[in-house]
Image: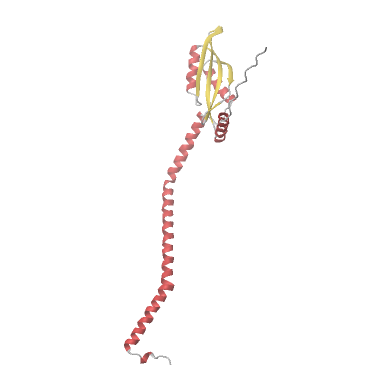
């Protein structure tokens, strides 16, 4: 027969009620409270990460004008560098520029002979032999204007002698090497390094065998 709660003493009924309450609370905590707490902890962790990312994005957004200014400054500096060190050589353009400077200095370019470029780490040196006619004053003016050239040009190996035919504005004949510079791109730098590596790794030539004596 089923046990009637009314027949139990009041303290037994109270104990049974407390036991059922504790069991109910345990079931609720195990099946509902614990998973909810785990999910809440997960959501709080994700929220923390999102807030950190948001703070980083806000910090980056604040620095965006500064970054844009830095990019503009770098582009400006790169443009200036390209004017001083062009990325490719153009003999015709350089000859026109030198011809203009020579005319401004009352000099005549009698010879313009480009030589092969000499590859360095990030640039190439391009020597050009110049033959000029004029006088000392005009030659000095030419070199002065050349020093204020946008493109870097250095002068070496200067030779000056008297002109064969002396004229008021043509008393000397000068010869020098004007070296300008070319900025190499990444592909050219890599190719130059491979060429240098192959050159350095080439085995030394074997010494020639001694000639046989003829009896």
Quadrant in the rendering for residue 94: top right
In the figure, is residue 188 to the left or right of 148? right
Quadrant of the image containing the C terminus: top right
Residue 41 at x, y percent in the picture: 41, 64
The image shows residue 147 at horizontal and vertical percentages of 48, 22
Q: Nearer the viewer, residue 154 or 209?
A: 209
Quarter where residue 197 is shown: top right
Say if 209 sits above or below 47 in the image.
Answer: above
Residue 124 horizontal side relative to residue 29, left or right? right
Question: Quick check: 21 above or below 199?
Answer: below
Image coords of residue 92 (percent x, y): 59, 24
Q: Which residue is drawn at 56% across and 17% down?
A: 130
Which residue extends farthest front?
215
Q: Residue at x 49, y 37 (%)?
A: 75
The N terminus lies in quadrant: bottom left
Q: What residue appears at the point 58 percent right and 16 percent down from the top-left corner?
A: 111
- Name the residue located 53 percent from the left edge and 20 percent from the top edge: 178
């Amino acid at each position: 027969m089923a046990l009637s709660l009314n027949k139990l003493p009041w303290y037994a009924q109270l104990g049974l009620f407390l036991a059922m309450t504790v069991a109910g609370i345990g079931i609720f905590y195990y099946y509902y409270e614990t998973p909810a707490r785990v999910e809440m902890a997960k959501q709080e962790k994700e929220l923390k990460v999102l807030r950190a990312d948001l703070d980083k994005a806000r910090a980056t957004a604040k620095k965006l004008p500064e970054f844009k200014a830095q990019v503009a400054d770098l582009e400006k500096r790169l443009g200036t560098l390209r004017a001083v060190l062009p990325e490719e050589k153009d003999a015709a353009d350089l000859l026109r520029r030198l011809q203009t400077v020579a005319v401004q200095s009352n000099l005549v370019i009698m010879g313009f002979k480009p030589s092969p470029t000499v590859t360095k780490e990030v640039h190439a040196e391009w020597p050009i032999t110049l033959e000029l006619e004029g006088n000392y004053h005009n030659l000095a003016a030419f070199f002065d204007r050349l020093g204020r050239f946008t493109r870097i040009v250095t002068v070496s190996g200067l030779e000056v002698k008297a002109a064969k035919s002396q004229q008021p504005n043509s008393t000397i004949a000068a010869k020098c090497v004007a070296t300008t510079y070319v900025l190499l791109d990444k592909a050219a730098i890599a190719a130059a390094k491979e060429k240098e590596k192959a050159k350095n790794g080439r085995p030394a030539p074997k010494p020639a065998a001694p000639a046989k004596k003829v009896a």
